[in-house]
Image: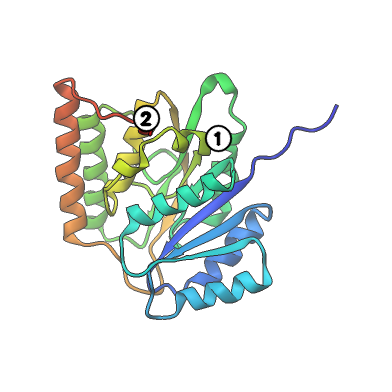
Amino acid sequence: MSEPSQPTVLVIVPTYNEAENIHDIAGRVLSTVPAAHLLVVDDGSPDGTGDLVDELAATDDRVHLMRRSGKLGLGTAYVAGFRWGLERGYDLLVEMDADGSHPADRLPALIAAVADAEPAANVMLAIGSRWIEGGSVVDWPKHRELLSRGGNGYARIMLGLDVHDITAGFRVYRADAIAKMELDAVDSKGYCFQVDMTLRVHDLGGRIVEVPIRFRDRIHGVSKMSQAIVVEAMLRTTQWGLQRRFGRRRSTAPKRG
C-alpha cells in the first residue's frame, strides 16, 4: 500500500522594511520544513527587502515574492497571500512574522496539528499560542504582557471562543477552510485581522487547536504595533461580540457570481 501524500505547505510572510531579518527567517523556515514553499508579500519596502527576496528566489525555487505598491497593511497582505496559495493548490496556508518572533522550530508541530488530525475532528486552524500551558514570551515588559493577556481575555469572553491567544499571528490554516470564506469582506488590519479570522473559522464549524510556543520579541527593525491597531481590535471585537449576542452573525461563505 502506498504512503499517503504529504500536504503541500505555503508559508506566507508579510514584510515592510525587514531587510535585516528576511535572510534569517527564510533560512529557518526552509531548513525546518524543507518541503514547504515561502511567499514573501512585500509592501514596497524602501530598505530593499523585496530585492533581497528576489535574490533568494533566483537560487531557490521554493521562494516566491509578491510585490505590492505601498504599505497596505497586514490583513490585506495575508488575504493576497491566501489568494495566491489557493490559486496554486496548496493544502495548508501558514501565517508567520518576518521579525523572528515566531519560532520556526515549532512549525512542524503546528502543521501536524492540522495535517495529522482525524477527518472527523475537523481541525481547520492551529494557533501558536503564548498563553496556554507550555507557552511563554521572552523580553517583554510587564505592561505589554498584561495588555496582550487582557485583550485576549476580553475577546475570548466577548466572542464566546475557547481560544486563549486569539490575537496570535503564527498560524496554520487548512486551505479548504480559507476557500470557504468571503475574503473580499475581510478588511481588518493589524492584530484585529487575527481575531477576525479566528471568528470566521469558528463560524464555519471548524475546530481550532492551540500549540504552545515561546515567543521572542524582535531583535532587529522597528515594531509595527501602534495605538491605532490596539483601538481597532478593541472596537471591532466589541462590535462583533454585541452582534453575536443579539443574533446577527456575519456570512462566512464566498459570494456567488
Q: CA distance from mark 1 to mark 2?
A: 21 Å
**Element marked by disc 1:** helix
Rendering coords of residue 6 (x, y %)? 69, 40
Rendering coords of residue 75 (x, y %)? 33, 52
Camera sees residue 92: yes
Q: Which residue is mark 1?
A: 114
Q: Which residue is mark 2?
A: 253
Residue plotted at (63% across, 53% down) = 36
| Quadrant holding the N terminus | top right
**Element marked by disc 2:** loop
Q: Is residue 140 left or right of residue 121?
A: left
Camera sees residue 20: no
Residue type at tag 2:
Ala
Residue type at tag 1:
Val
Q: Is residue 116 left or right of residue 221?
A: right
Q: Is 165 or 176 nearer to us in this picture?
A: 176
Residue plotted at (23% across, 50% down) = 146
The picture quadrant where one finds residue 251 is top left
Residue plotted at (46% across, 36% down) = 179
Residue plotted at (26% across, 41% down) = 152
Of tags 1 and 2, the one toward the viewer is 2
Q: Is 77 or 119 nearer to us in this picture?
A: 77
State whether residue 102 is above or below residue 165. Answer: below
Disc 2 crowd, CA 10 A, few/some/many (<14, 14-19, 20+): some
| Quadrant holding the C terminus | top left
Q: Earlier in the sequence, mark 1 or mark 2?
A: 1
Q: Is residue 55 left or right of residue 221?
A: right
Rendering coords of residue 123 (x, y %)? 50, 29
